[in-house]
Amino acid sequence: MFKKSIVLGLALLIFLGGVAFAVSTNPVSSTKNPVTRTLYVANNSAAPSIKSYPPKAIWPPDDTLGWDDAPLLVNTQSLPGGSACNGLAVSSDGKKLYASIANGEASEIRVYYLDSSGMPGTYEAMAGATWSARSTPSGLTLGRDYKLYVTDNTLRRIRVFDTYNNTWISDITDTHLPDARLLDVATTKGTTDSGFALPGSHPPNVAHYKIFASEHSSDGRIHVLNYDLGTITYEKALTKSTFVRLTYPSDLKIVGDRLYVAVNDDSNVVAVMVYSTVPDASGNYPVIAQITTDNAIKFFDLPLKL
């Protein structure tokens, strides 16, 4: 039986026991509903869309047997012609699907409202953000404090939204991180200060957590930032000097205290690098494992936990 899975880009589902299917003409991003186990795949074909696949066992929801791709069961949400969906995320209660839609000045961050089976119906666009003709919203991730972080790859920034009222808050620019083309972003679970409440914050208030952002280049870097009581500071970058295969890092996912990074090394070998999100005594983030396309898993430190 498959154990707990993680979902990375290109609609690739990686298990300890093998690789599951994904059906899409040009899949770019994917995510899974934690409650209904529905699989969502961004399809950036000539007719872009977001496809939703129900698990083969729907009650109780169980995706260990995969997902059903029967046309009558697949939900397809069409996107504007010429646009691209580069990032997907689902709320922890399984009721909302967030999607980054890259479309120049018409770019948007959509919030799809999901029914009890996890299928999207109506949606609204988050308000307040101004986009330019060069805007390319890409990866996104949800923080536990009602924040949504979205990378704008071309404008080289991370945009921050409030999911409590679906509005833009601010941008993290070169004031807080190097001038780099960022492709994806992920946050740790974080810790809460007992009895502490930020002015105007919505519970649960998470006071401290880390933000990881991938720089998609041959000189690949993973930038690490700290969120501390409402203040964001730059910590460091994980670089190829740490591990030479960190080339063209793209999608990021955090499961527990592990950071999974999809990479393409200089030999065009696709792999997933696994880092600890907890720094060691020297302040470094150790590489724990490498998962290659031949399903081989090489461990460098602690056992891989999925």
Image (cartoon, helix red, strand yellow):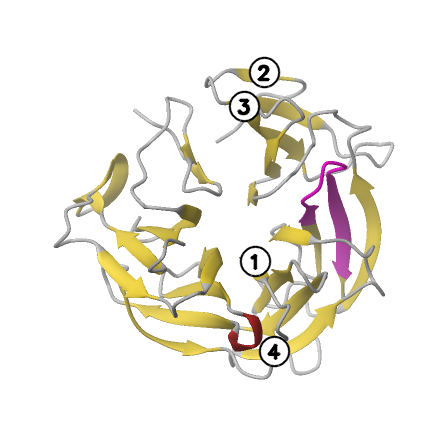
Residue at image position (44%, 58%) is 92
Disc number for residue 298: 2
Q: Which of 156 and 282 is in front in this view?
A: 156
Identify which amino acid the numbered label 1 is placed on.
Answer: Ser
The answer to whether residue 95 is magenta is: no
Q: Position of residue 74 (x, y in %)?
A: 20, 54
Q: In which quarter of the image is the N terminus?
A: top left
Q: Where is residue 123 in the image (x, y as percent from the top left)?
A: 36, 75
Disc 3, SS: strand
Disc nearer the start of the sequence (3/1): 1
Identify which amino acid the numbered label 2 is placed on.
Answer: Lys
How far apart marks 3 and 1 lie (CA) works out to: 24 Å
Identify which amino acid the numbered label 4 is placed on.
Answer: Trp
Residue at label 4? 168
Disc 2, SS: strand
With 289 as the anchor, is 233 left or right in this view?
right
Residue at image position (53%, 72%) is 107
Disc number for residue 229: none
Name the main secondary structure of what is drawn in magenta: strand
Disc nearer the start of the sequence (2/1): 1
